[in-house]
Image (cartoon, helix red, strand yellow):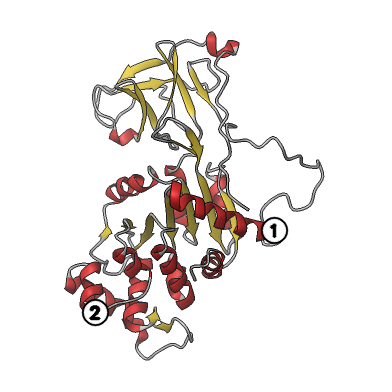
Amino acid sequence: MSFELKPYRKPDFNEKKFIEAPDVKIVCVEKDGVVPDDFHATSIFPEYFKVNGEWLCATQSRMDCVPVLEEGKILSKEARSVKKGDKVIIGRSEDCEDGIYVHNNGFADNTSAVDPFAFRKNRSRETSFSKEYDEICELLKYERDNGNILWVLGPALSFDRNARDAFAALVNNGYVDGVCAGNALATHDLEAAYLHTALGQNIYTQENVHNGHYHHLETINKVRGDGSIKEFIKNKNIDNGIMWALEKNDIPYVLAGSIRDDGPLPEVTGNVYEAQDRMRKLTDQATTVICLATMLHTIAIGNMTPSYRVMKDGNIRQIYFYVVDISEFMVNKLADRGSLSSRSIITNVQDFVAKVGKGLEVY
């Protein structure tokens, strides 16, 4: 089985509603960080705006931003980022009435029919995911050569030796272009590499070691003493794990801080808006996103990631978004928050990574 991108079907701009649609209304921002009344909020779908009689597609859309006309292009900006004088498009309709069209079925597959009555149409632990694993492996092979793969990692991945080894193998073999995570993922992965435990429990035998509850704090302290994760890896002769593989291969990562963080590690970004901006730089490049057992980071990335990417040649392609968690509530919550293009797999993320590694024959 070889992977092929779904073709994108553009709107038919020869239809009457497009021809008769007015140009968009534009209002200039009067105060930094405050958008005009009746502002249009962008979605995850391709959106077109009629400017001087021409329909322009927003190049980097994402949820709950505002469209800004800048040098003949439509940019999506967070409301907090607009500046006085920015040209913001206003209007709340989405079917050409205000010169705005949201194209929510550009990647729709019209070949599959669904019975009006069928069992298990929703995703659950009883769903068969075998085909999904095959598709993910083929997708990752394609993306390694043609796209950008962003992983969003929860700390559960660092608590198991096999999962850490499998993910490191994915990094070493080119299947990781960026990582978003928190302080805990990096801390416990480094603890595992340094002291062979995660939160004081052996990552293979599950044995709780004496005074193991100090291990993550000791690890953080050593990293802070060395000044960085990179220096810690070098000074302590670390040769395994997730952070080791990321540093070894110069893969960009963002560790976003939270109020409950211990330490934190030097690389953790404590300012939430600075962390958001850094995460957006990775999502703005991603063509496939895989989120593993981290609800808040997954929802954050889901809100930042559109369903499409405008490529350098102007073509529009789909962004593939997977959510993997052992909780049905978790994987369904993202869809409830508006990230309707996400696909879910309900399983232990440690098993998931190992299985994908084996499917790609890197682990």
Among the 4 quarters of the image, the one containing residue 267:
bottom left
Disc 1 target residue: 127
Q: Amino acid at mark 2?
A: Lys
User: Is 109 rendered above or below residue 209?
Assistant: above
Residue 75: numbered disc: none
State the CA–CA distance, disc 1 to disc 2.
Answer: 44 Å
Label 1 packing within 10 angstroms: few (<14), some (14-19), many (20+): few
The answer to whether residue 129 is visible is no
Q: Nearer the viewer, residue 168 or 96?
A: 168
From this viewpoint, which residue is outermost toward the bottom? 210
User: Is 211 rendered above or below residue 25?
Assistant: below
Q: Which residue is found at the position 54% from the left and 68% from the top?
A: 358
Q: Which residue is found at the position 57% from the left and 31% from the top?
A: 104
Q: Amino acid at mark 1?
A: Thr
Q: Which residue is found at the position 44% from the left and 58% from the top?
A: 175
Disc 2 target residue: 236
Element marked by disc 2? loop
270 vs 292, left or right, is left
